[in-house]
């Protein structure tokens, strides 16, 4: 899906209008009364198969009322809604916040020094790291000032 198509999809329709959403609703009606004990009894490897680990996170979907079919429909909904394209656009610094018509800069807060994310032609990662450097230096500056707001070097007490 092209970026323009993803933008059109996101702007012109609601998630509940997507075909996969309807399929998820139908699927929910089939499994809403199924107990987790039954799901584990029918699929002893569920705990291993319906989990994911990466970047220091462990996600265990097995303890939710989901099946392979549920996961398939959720992935299909993400494809239909252009989630991967929107994620990639976010990392490129594109203006994906359609309400405010601006970039979402969540990723810049964790971007390593030297990473380049541009917004309107300006690298914003450097600005973030400059801020962190000033901010992290603030406590040191406070330690050099006594309780009256006077630098310790000028204090007579």
Image (tube, rainbow, N blue to C red):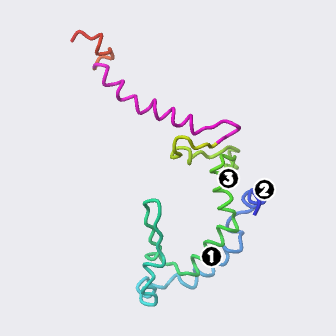
| Residue name at image x 68 percent, y 43 percent | 102
Q: Residue most toward the bottom?
A: 42
Q: Residue most toward the left?
A: 157
Q: Earlier in the sequence, mark 2 or mark 3?
A: 2
Task: Determine whether, in the image, residue 39 is placed left or right of residue 116.
Answer: left
Q: Residues within 10 Å of mark 1 (few under 14, many from 20)?
A: many
Residue 89 is marked as 3
Task: Determine whether, in the image, residue 139 is placed left or right of residue 45.
Answer: left
The residue under label 1 is 73
Which is closer to the viewer, label 3 or label 1? 3
Q: Position of residue 4 (x, y in %)?
A: 78, 56
Q: Position of residue 78 (x, y in %)?
A: 64, 67
Q: Please report the bounds of the magenta region as a residue range.
A: 118-146
Judge by depth and name the residue closer to the eye, 35 or 68: 68
Q: Position of residue 37 (x, y in %)?
A: 40, 85
Residue 86 is marked as none
Q: Earlier in the sequence, mark 3 or mark 1?
A: 1
The residue under label 2 is 4
Which is closer to the viewer, label 2 or label 1? 2
């Amino acid at each position: 899906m092209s970026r323009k198509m993803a933008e059109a999809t996101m702007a012109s329709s609601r998630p509940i209008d997507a075909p996969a959403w309807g399929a998820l609703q139908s699927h929910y009606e089939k499994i809403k009364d199924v107990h987790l004990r039954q799901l584990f009894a029918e699929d002893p490897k569920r705990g291993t198969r319906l989990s994911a680990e990466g970047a220091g996170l462990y996600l265990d979907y097995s303890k939710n009322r989901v099946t392979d079919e549920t996961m398939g429909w959720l992935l299909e909904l993400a494809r239909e809604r252009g989630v991967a394209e929107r994620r990639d656009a976010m990392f490129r610094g594109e203006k994906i916040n359609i309400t405010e018509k601006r970039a979402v800069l969540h990723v810049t807060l964790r971007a390593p020094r030297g990473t380049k994310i541009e917004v309107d032609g300006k690298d914003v990662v450097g600005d973030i790291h400059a801020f962190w450097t000033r901010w992290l230096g603030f406590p040191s500056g406070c330690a050099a000032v006594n309780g009256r707001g006077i630098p310790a070097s000028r204090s007579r007490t």
